[in-house]
Image: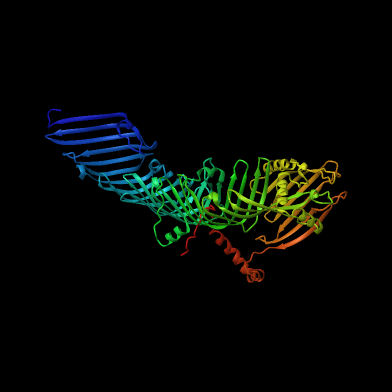
Amino acid sequence: MRDSTEKDIKLNFTNVDLAKITPDIDSLNLSGNVNGKLDLVQQNGNYLPNSSIIINNFRVNDFLLGSFDANISGNESLTNYTVDATIKNDDSNSFTAKGDIYVAGKASRIDVGLVFDGFDLYPLNPLLRDVLSDIRGKAEGEIQVVGDLRKPNFNGELIVKKAGLGIPFLNVNYDFAENASVTLKNQSFIFNNINITDTKYKTKGLLKGDLSHVNFAKWSLGLDITTKNLLILDTKETEDALYYGTGFIGGEASISGPTEELRINVIGETKPGTVFKIPLNDAESFGDNTFIHFITKEEKEARNKGEELIFDEIKGLELDFDLDVTEDAEVEIIIDKATGHSLKGRGRGGLLVEINTNGKFNMWGDFAVFEGLYNFAYGGFVQKQFTVQPGGTLAWEGSPLDAEINMNAIYKTQANPSPLLDTPINRSIPVELNIALTGSLEHPVPEFTFEFPNVNSTIKSELNYRLESDSDRQDQALYLVSTGSFSGGLDELNFSGTIAERLNGIINSVFSNGDSKLSLGLNYEAGQNTPDYQTDDRVGLTLQTQISDRVLINGKVGVPVGGATDTVIAGDVEVSFLLNEDGTLTAKVFNRENSIRNFGEDIGYTQGVGLSYNVDFDTFKELLRKIFTKKSDKEDDVLERPEKEAENALPDYISVKPVSKN
């Protein structure tokens, strides 16, 4: 440095830590070893800047990109800089930047061309970590960076390969179709009708829309998805989960808004495989929060008219669901997770739901049950399974806990009715305990009735007389599900039947395989011993198996244990043959132990052969058409059916509208 008009400054870098000489940038962590030089020469008042830098092991957000090589030269007035930079990885340039940067205060501008060739997208993950995850893939294409240096625009097109991303809150992950196109315009990434596939179940959809930003901060999403069947929910049970399960829909979904106030809207129909669970005991503490808000009928009408709906301003992620729930979806309401007390079923209905990460959970809509199970559990030992009958309903008008329930369920068992008879019999008979559940879902009002199939009219009439009053039916119902037997008085309490059934359930779950092809279990029936009648304890083996797609076997073998009767093996077996492809024509061969046996009689059996044909119809005309239509027409109907079924599945709490066909 001679004077104020002549300077010669040289800076050399040798293995300098890049992180120590660069400022902290939110969501952008740079590291590597800097080598090179920076020369600044001033002659006769003119500057001649020049720099040549190499950064080895260049990492962005802890991801290794390769070797960064940059050459920068400036003009005499230090207002214009020419940039030539590359990132090399495996002897190829994955990134190249060439152009000029003009520095003049607020008028500073940039004009640099970027070329991507297999550039890894992983470093983008921290930029969107609160909304998206597992951003992956390789990018190819050219981008021009132009405009104000403080807020430059990015214009061009990238082709991404082996790309994809995840949505953490929904626990779903999608792969992009190979060579998907992403357009960059100003400060937005535009997705051009990209086919997506979920990585777990391989369901598909179409993605379009944009991701916008302000200098790679303040991200905002405007994405739309259309699908015939796509996984949109796959969450697991956690202690604070207000809901969880697996959801497939056919319809439309949108993800919009800034990342700190993101909203996901779904309009569609549930598809096969949908399982949605609501744990009431866990959700109870959130009753006053605003985690889910179901849209009211008035709000839905306003939306259809194009009026804007205004909700409470909430920070975080919010989900709106407008779903048509089909019988392909299974809904389970967990009343008590500790004991297994729950209600689950399949059916149809329309549900409107809104959820957010701050605790809102509201539901509106009706759900009609076609089939289901009511698992009654109490105290850890009492556990009985009732079969829900078709036609029951659940209706929500806000809180999920305050749903109105109107359902009937049946518990089937074998019990000896002698405590209720003047003339005892030494044999258990089939018993069907019906329970009608009405009132609030959280506090339903049960009403019990009894049915005795395959019992002669004399015994049935006497039993109905003994169970005529509501109080008698309720007492006997609770005693039956608690002990497995009827009560002749409070002094006859015997809980061995309950303990045996609980142990049976634990043992049977061990011997059953997951695909339902084989179910093998042990069964213990506790006997009774009174002055009027005696039955033996019985140890049994149950078998349910599917030899092929058309042959099914159900069987039970029991050995009495005790001295009331001879130790004779008693067995039931039923073999079903499906005679056609859709399973409507069935042949059965069976051997059954007689349901009634008087004291002192030996065990008797009934054998038989049967043929049944099952057909679903709405009108008598449709019944005649299905029976007498030509075979070719039936085959056409079979071919059309999967297409119709494929258009139906999401969690029960969501209402979906199918996509219109062009």
Count of numbered circles on the image: 0
List x then y, in percent, for residue 122: 40, 42
State the residue at coordinates (72%, 46%).
479
Residue 236 in view: no
Given residues 106 and 322, the one toward you in this image is 322
List x then y, in percent, for residue 64: 39, 37
State the residue at coordinates (68%, 46%).
384
State the residue at coordinates (42%, 60%).
302
List x then y, in percent, for residue 598: 85, 51
Q: How is the image coloured?
A: rainbow
Residue 301 in view: yes
List x then y, in percent, for residue 304: 43, 61
Q: Is residue 461 left or right of residue 650?
A: right
State the residue at coordinates (40%, 45%).
315
Given residues 475 and 26, the one toward you in this image is 475
Which quadrant is the N terminus positioned in? Answer: top left
Q: Is residue 331 left or right of residue 196?
A: right
The quadrant in which residue 506 appears is: top right
Q: Is residue 263 left or right of residue 613?
A: left
Given residues 251 and 382, the one toward you in this image is 382
Given residues 190 and 82, the one toward you in this image is 190
The quadrant in which residue 44 appears is: top left
